[in-house]
Structure formats: C-alpha cells, structure tokens
Amino acid sequence: MAMVGEEKAGGSRSKVLVIGATGRFGQELVKASLAAGHPTYALVREPTFSRADASLLLRSFSASGVTLLKGSLQDFPSLLEALKQVDVVICAVPSSQVLEQKLLIRAIKQAGCIERFIPSEFGADPDKVQTVEMDHDFYKKKAEIRRCIEKEGIPHTYISCNFFQRYLLPSLIQPGLKTPPTDKVKIFGSGNVKAVFVKESDVATFTICAIDDTRTLNKVLYLRPSGNAYSQNELTEIWEVKMGKKLEKIHVTEEQLLKSIHETPFPSNIDLFFIYSAFVKGDHTYFSIDSSGLDGSELYPHVRCTTVSEFLDMLSERTSI
Ligand SMILES: NC(=O)c1ccc[n+]([C@@H]2O[C@H](COP(=O)([O-])OP(=O)(O)OC[C@H]3O[C@@H](n4cnc5c(N)ncnc54)[C@H](OP(=O)(O)O)[C@@H]3O)[C@@H](O)[C@H]2O)c1
C-alpha cells in the first residue's frame, strides 16, 4: 500500500466502496473520494433507486463517474460481489445499525481483497468514552464492531472525529433549539471543558487521506483541529462578540444534567447525554493520543478545516440579531 498522496503500484488510485452513500455523511465521502481521484463505488439498496429523493442524487453520482452497485448490508452475496471490485470499504450507515456491519466483516474476510476498512463510527472514540453505562449501548456497539474487525485481522482505520458541526452547534448547545439563543444560554457543568466540532466534508476529506496511508493502518485517526475545539464558555463568548450582545447565563450543574438525563425517556435524552459526555466528562479531549492513534491535523496539515468561528459566522448571517 502506498503512502499518502502516492498512487498504488501500476499508477492507479485505490478503488473505494462507500456503503451508506445516499446518507448525509455518505454523500460527503463520495464527493471526497471523487475529488481525490479514486474510482468510487456506492452500494445502494434496491428500493432506494426508485425513491424520489434519492434518484436525483444517484443520477448525479452516475454523471460524476460513480459506479452504482445494488446491494445491502443484509445481503451477503451482494456484499461479496461489491467487495471483489474494490480495495477500500467505507461504511456510513447510521449508528443505530452499526451491528449490521457484522455480515460485512464476514464478507470482507471471505473476499480477502480489502486493503482497508473504515467502519461506521465517525464520533467520539468508543474505547475512550467514560459514560458507557448511560448511552443505551451507543458506544458499546461501536466497540463491539472494532473487536470483530481486530479478531478477523481486517486492515482498518477508525475515524474519531468527535461531533459533526451540524450536531448541537447550530443551537449553540441548547437542547430543543434549532438556532442559537439570542437572550439566555444554558451552560452545562463548569462550562470550561472543550469539545470538538468538525464539518462533515472535512471529516470526509481526512478519511480519504487516511485510506491509502500506511501510517494510519490499524490506528485510530483523531480529529481535533485547534480551531474546532472549544468549551461552552468560549463558544458563548465567540457568539456574544458576533452578536454584539451579552447573553444571560443559566448554569446547569452536573447533578441537574444527570437528573434530566435519567428523567427524560430514551431517545429524547440523547442530546443531553452527548452534552454530558463531551462538555462535562470531556470525552473528546480528556486523553492524550497514545501509540494506538494519530492526530489528523498533524498527518495532513494541508487539509483546511472549517473552523467553529467560521461556522458561527455562517449562523450569524442566517440569524436575525
Ligand atoms: N459525530 C457526529 O456528530 C455524528 C452525527 C450524525 C451521524 N454521525 C455518524 O455518521 C455516520 C452516518 O450517519 P448519517 O447521519 O449520515 O446517516 P444517514 O443520513 O441516516 O444515512 C444512512 C445511510 O445508510 C444507508 N443504509 C441504511 N441501511 C442500510 C443497509 N442495510 N444496507 C446498505 N445501506 C444502508 C442508507 O441508505 P438508504 O438511502 O437506502 O436508506 C443511507 O445511505 C454514522 O457513522 C454516524 O454515527 C456522526
């Protein structure tokens, strides 16, 4: 396998299969793969071809040179057939379906030709989060998939990108709101714990950088760009400067937040849970990257990330303040 930026022997780029290509994040993976010049394949479920909202997207994929393959995670022969045509598999099915990757892992093992598998994670590191008893197995399932991959000896990279910018940041971490607050803001815990928000297209670019890079083989790629890691107090201050106005702070203690998480039925409490994990426990940033991981910004300094401040600029243009 070639180092990053190099081509494979014979002058060709690795062939990339995206599973979940019609999803919000999957689309970004397809774009990033094409932009880097990889022959790109998408595994698409049969009914999706005739779904009105997907057919336009699939037509645009085809026009851009994407090879569309019929199949699904539940259909072993379709997986095997697709895998035989590619070198790299990236899975972007929703977190609720991560265990369905077990059949894919069996197919990858049987196909024997896959040089890198990127499983559907794209969040906090499931082996590092400190809140596993509270999340209805959200991270346990992702960790279980890691163990299956490792047991089968499948070459892999795990992408630990923390939060997407589309998650929680549009409301400035205010559960229940869709836009940032203009008068009062809830601050959870001390407000000083940093969490990380990376734009999905940037996560996709980092992912594609990693697939042919020998340095990321069997490692976790952590994304923590410096312009993307902020505490709630810092985020509030940035927003106040952009608005030219101070917000009233409502402090929610760790105990009050935990009480709300326990009193709110699952899955309605999931935003509160992620706030607790990231902004109280510090699950994105509490640990240093050890020998099992690498820092994406150090490996790929050429990837220019949309910063949190730039994202908030975009929000302030849309918010009448
Ligand atoms: N860090 C964060 O803040 C954050 C936030 C959200 C998501 N994520 C992560 O991003 C990844 C993708 O999430 P998303 O929100 O982009 O997902 P999504 O929009 O719900 O898309 C899911 C995709 O999976 C496909 N799919 C579902 N079941 C399948 C099956 N059995 N066989 C083949 N394809 C199947 C869907 O295809 P159809 O079109 O056929 O339905 C669709 O393309 C996940 O790893 C998730 O954990 C991270």
Image (tube, helix red, strand yellow):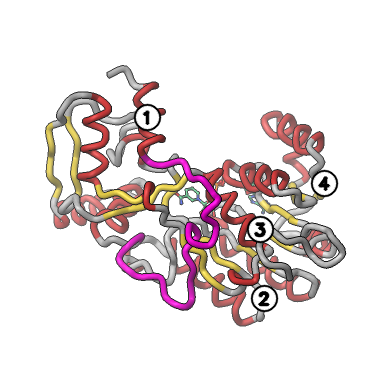
> Which part of the image, by quadrant, shows the C terminus?
top left
Quarter of the rendering containing residue 285:
bottom left
Earlier residue among tags 3 and 4: 4
Earlier residue among tags 3 and 1: 3
Residue 10 horizontal/vertical position (percent): 87, 64
Residue 221 horizontal/vertical position (percent): 51, 64
Is 291 magenta? The answer is yes
> Which part of the image, by quadrant, shows the N terminus?
bottom right
Which residue is labeled 2 in the image?
154
Question: Looking at the image, do the residues carrying marks 1 and 2 touch, with CB atoms under 8 Å apart?
Answer: no
Q: Secondary structure at mark 4?
A: strand
Question: Looking at the image, do the residues carrying marks 3 and 1 touch, with CB atoms under 8 Å apart?
Answer: no
Q: Mark 2: which amino acid?
A: Ile
Earlier residue among tags 2 and 4: 4
Q: Mark 3: which amino acid?
A: Ile
Q: Is residue 299 left or right of residue 130?
A: right
Which residue is labeled 3 in the image?
90
The residue drawn where x is 75% and y is 69% is 114
Residue range of the region highlighted in magenta in the rendering: 284-308
Which residue is labeled 4 in the image?
67
- How far is the residue under mark 2 from the one under mark 4? 24 Å
The residue drawn where x is 74% and y is 75% is 109
Residue 236 horizontal/vertical position (percent): 23, 38
Which residue is labeled 1 in the image?
313
